Image: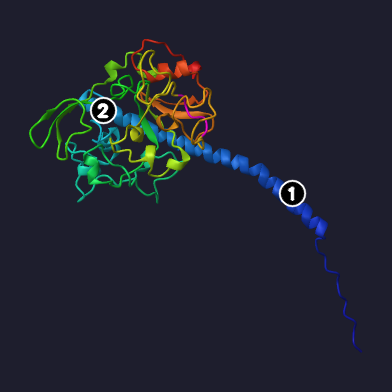
Amino acid sequence: MYGAWTHGKRTAFTLIELLVVIAIIAVLIGLLLPAIQKVREAANRSACSNNLKQLGLAVHSYHDVYHFFPPSAIRDDWASWAVFLLPYLEQEAIYRMWNLQKRWPEQSTNPDPRPHNLSVFFCPSRRSAAGLGFSVNDVANAPADSLGPFPGGLGDYACNTGNDSTNNRPRGALTYSRARGITPTGTILTGNFDASPIGTVITSFQSVTSIASITDGTTNTLLIGEKHIRPNSRDGKNEDRSIFSGCNANNYARLAGIPPAGVTQTDKVTQYPLASNELDATMATTTPPGAYDSNIIFGGPHPGVCMFVFCDGSVKGVKTSVDLTVLTRLAVRNDGQVVNSDDF
């Protein structure tokens, strides 16, 4: 006699129950994502602060050796401050490839010192040096631009050159050096090197700013900060060309605050605020419209702040909403104006 098989009932989610579970998971993900993003941003901001700290220490190490800060650039077309800091950033091998007498497009290509993306020059909230290409359109001023573009390493940081775009940006923590050069025909140059012929070399140069020249106090003066990069200029175009190249001041330097009264700015703008929006290409929404060009101002990817290392080596976030008068006092090294930390 055969026994009867007993079959248990299968249990399963109903469609409604499944939808409820999916909705709960979606809500949980929605709650977790902002927290995850905040943690990631906090870690990136900490790494950015560490980069700036290293750059500040490198500037001070340079000062210990030469008793001056590095120049913002030797002159137009020649090496920028980023080159001078290489030995103090554990990049002595790359530094030794540079010939400081020669302009950007006349550097050796064997080995070539220019195409190096170094992590210390990148804010991780914006991008990473890993896998990033190089600037390929960085050409010098005439007639050296006939030599063509050469690839170069990028960077997210720029030195503070004050609030005045005229006369070699004289008011910031770093400025052009006083330089002498000689052309292939023996003509001595001491002023503008822009139109100097191919083969012109720097015979001597001297930085002009030091700790002693920061008369407003090193704790109150910007040294190096995050530069704003327009979205369409990212990764090698316009103001995002090589940080090592002096061919375009916007590669490696920025202005901040209100220009001096009575001075006609070469860029024809009336103010240099901090960029409040990393994705803003034109900053045309400001009042008055077109008051400034966003390719010459500071601004980073961190919400509400732009990170700086000050001349004393301390790293601070300056609110992007900072009053322009306060920002001017932070940018100008010797205006005699007092700044309180609560102001920014």
User: The residue under label 1 is which amino acid type?
Assistant: Ile
Residue 157, given in percent of the width and then of the height, sits at: 38, 34
Inspect the magenta stretch and tell me whether residue 35 lies in it: no
User: The residue under label 2 is which amino acid type?
Assistant: Pro
Picture quadrant of residue 152? top left
Q: Which residue is mark 2?
A: 71
126 left or right of 66? right
SS at circle 1: helix
Residue that appears at 35% across and 36% down: 251
Picture quadrant of residue 187? top left
Lower sequence index among marks 1 and 2:
1
Residue stretch rendered in magenta on the structure: 273-277
Task: Name the residue nearer the viewer: 165 or 303.
Answer: 165
79 left or right of 236? left
Task: Name the residue nearer the viewer: 239 or 282.
Answer: 282
Q: Main secondary structure of the magenta part?
A: loop
Q: Vertically, is 53 above or below 109?
A: above
SS at circle 2: loop
Inspect the magenta stretch and tell me whether residue 274 lies in it: yes
Extreme-bottom residue of the structure:
1
Residue 276, given in percent of the width and then of the height, sits at: 52, 30
Q: Which residue is mark 1?
A: 24
